[in-house]
Image (tube, helix red, strand yellow):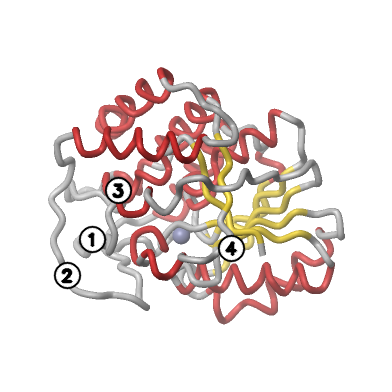
Amino acid sequence: MIREAWRSLIYPELLAAKRQEVVPRRVANAAASTDQRRQSAQPTLYTPQRLGPQRNLISRHHSSMVVPECSQSDWCSLLTDLPVFCPGSGPMLVLAPHPDDETLAIGGLLCAQRENNVPIALVAVTDGENAYDGYAGLGELRVREQTRAASRLGIRSQDLVRLRISDSDVGSKQSSIVQQLLPRITSETHILAPWTHDFHPDHEACGLVARELASRTSARLTFYLFWAWHRGTRALLQGLRLEGFPLTSTQRTAKAEALAFHASQLHHPSGDPILHGVHLWPALLPFEVYLPS
Ligand SMILES: [Zn+2]
């Protein structure tokens, strides 16, 4: 039932995506306006409750939905004509603060890189056990969901590195995480991590860890965004050198199906999901946005 509810939300987008031709260089521009039109034509899929600014403390409970500061159409007008992001062929090390971050933000890129047999180590920093209260075994459930989602994107379970840091406590463990990951990184490694201003303490801590790792090893570093789309404003990103990575319909399908595995974030026993439809549009675009450091 959970899966069916999610599919009913996501598959109209997928069907539309399959009809859309992806053109590498100008794809962001065309896709943004297409999705903008599609969004405005759709009925509202959620009923947000405005809870006031919560800039520095992310909501962990299902009853406190994060209401975006900016609409999809506002963002998409900023994402036109992005230069194309070239990930290269070096081995990737991906920092995911919580299970689902990797799928939501960079699932298409992960799929594309695995299509080219690029080695990927997916570092699951926490098990996401504190996403909400009242569900015994949530961490174990999210680990299983992430493993299945990663597999759908082409990442083998043995390439998942679980650090088991407490959810919401990554900031106090930064030094330890750096020490654990340093042996896995060379100057050939491409590190991907949440942006250091991604509006969630765990995300920002992972960004700082990644910056330290890159600084010590001369590895390439690229940031991705998730909460910035929902808690940030255009002024925050204006002037940053964002790049777009166009996705094929195959990659978008894989990403959407991987997202469906994260059912615990798309549904709650109360019926109110953690991630509402309004939070999912960045994951449904035919391109992903990256910030090279
Ligand atoms: Zn997260």
Q: Is residue 76 left or right of residue 146?
A: left
Determine the secondary structure under disc 2.
loop
Label 1 or label 4, whichever lies nearer to me, is 1
Q: Is residue 144 left or right of residue 85?
A: left
* Cα distance between the residues tagged 3 and 1: 20 Å
* Cα distance between the residues tagged 2 and 1: 8 Å
Q: Could you tell me the amino acid type at mark 2?
A: Leu
Q: Could you tell me the amino acid type at mark 3?
A: Ser
Q: Earlier in the sequence, mark 2 or mark 1?
A: 2
Q: Which residue appears at 24% of the width and 61% of the height?
A: 67
In this view, the residue in front, 132 or 30, is 30
- Residue 175 visible: yes
Label 3 or label 2, whichever lies nearer to me, is 3
Q: Residues within 10 Å of mark 3 (few under 14, many from 20)?
A: some
Residue located beneath label 1 in the image? 65
Determine the secondary structure under disc 4.
strand
Establish if 245 lies above or below 94: above
Label 4 or label 2, whichever lies nearer to me, is 2
* Cα distance between the residues tagged 1 and 4: 26 Å
In this view, the residue in front, 176 or 232, is 232
Residue located beneath label 2 in the image? 51
The reply to whether callout 2 and callout 1 are in contact (CB within 8 Å) is yes
Q: Earlier in the sequence, mark 3 or mark 2?
A: 2
* Cα distance between the residues tagged 3 and 2: 22 Å
Q: Could you tell me the amino acid type at mark 4?
A: Arg
